[in-house]
Amino acid sequence: MNAVLQFGAGYRTYIIAAVLVLVVVLENGLGIDVPGVDVGSDWLTEILAALGLGSLRAGLANTAK
């Protein structure tokens, strides 16, 4: 379990952004109801927010090097 947590240490933000995009695609693209998620009609904004989160994290990682 500790090895899994150490592997995901640098990728947690990317995983969260990918899961957010996946949930929005499932809800609005495929019409599958995901329990506990209400995307609404502005689903493109949710996808752009997830992509922006991933881009921000990548920018911060490159700046720190």
Image (cartoon, rainbow, N blue to C red):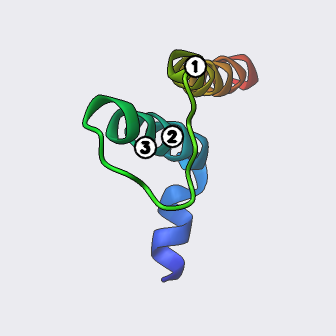
In the orientation shown, which residue stands out farthest toward the bottom? 1
Mark positioned earlier in the residue sequence (2 or 1): 2
The residue tagged 2 is: 20
The amino acid sitting under disc 3 is: Val
Mark 3 or 1, which is nearer the eye?
1
Q: Residue at x 60, y 42 (%)?
A: 13
Residue 30, above or below 3: above
| Cα–Cα span, label 3 and label 1 | 14 Å
Dividing the picture into quarters, in which one does residue 36 lie?
Answer: bottom right
What's the residue type where badge 2 is placed?
Answer: Leu
Are the two marked residues, 3 and 2, in contact with CB atoms closer than 8 angstroms?
yes
- Mark 3: give few (<14), some (14-19) or many (20+) Cα within 10 Å: many
Q: Position of residue 32 (x, y in %)?
A: 30, 48
Instruction: Return the disc, 3 or 1, that comes first in the chain's sequence.
Output: 3
- Mark 3 sits on what residue? 23
Circle 1 sits on which residue? 42
Q: Element type at marker 3?
A: helix
The disc labelled 1 sits on which kind of residue? Asp
Instruction: Determine the residue positioned at 48% across, 83% down.
Output: 1
